[in-house]
Amino acid sequence: MTSRLCPVNVHRIERVIRAALGLAVLSLVFIGPQSAWGYLGLIPLATALLGSCPAYTLLGISTCPRHPSPKAT
């Protein structure tokens, strides 16, 4: 069951990359320049955890592989 508001549209590999990128950017709050700009890392981290990208939804993009529909017998 998919939700129209928050459909899963991010592939598993992309989710891992987004999570790693989000954590790396978020680490800038604590390490390095200690800038508040590091909180922008929460965006890719959230989309990785949810599996849904709002920009993809607006543009009608999905990197998830399509699951074959069950055959009716």
Image (cartoon, rainbow, N blue to C red):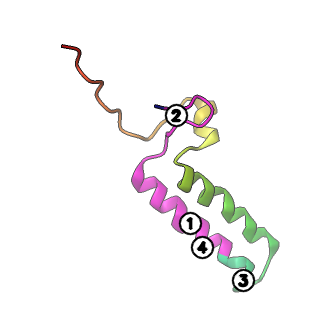
Query: What is the quadrant of residue 45 in the picture?
Result: bottom right
Q: In the displayed structure, does residue 50 sit left or right of residue 1?
A: right
Mark 2 belongs to which amino acid? Ile
Taking 59 as reference, is 49 above or below it?
below
Tell me the quarter of the picture where residue 41 sits: bottom right
* Circle 3 residue: 30
Let me know if residue 15 is in the magenta part.
Answer: yes
User: Is tag 3's residue or tag 1's residue first in the polypeptide sequence?
Assistant: 1
User: Which residue is under mark 4?
Assistant: 24
Residue type marked 1: Leu
Residue 40 location (% of width, % of height): 72, 62
User: Of helix, strand and loop, which one carries label 2?
Assistant: loop
Instruction: Name the magenta segment's main secondary structure.
Output: helix
Q: Residue furthest bottom?
A: 32
- In this view, the residue in front, 60 or 48, is 48
Q: CA distance from mark 4 to mark 1?
A: 5 Å
Q: Name the residue tied to disc 2.
A: 61
The magenta stretch spans which residues?
Answer: 2-26
Occupied quadrant, residue 53: top right
Q: Residue at x 22, y 19 (%)?
A: 71
> Looking at the image, how many numbered discs can be counted on the residues?
4
Q: Nearer the viewer, mark 3 or mark 1?
A: 3
Q: Amino acid at mark 3?
A: Phe
Dot 4, crowdedness within 10 Å: few (<14), some or many (≥20)?
Answer: some
The residue depicted at 64 percent of the width and 40 percent of the height is 54
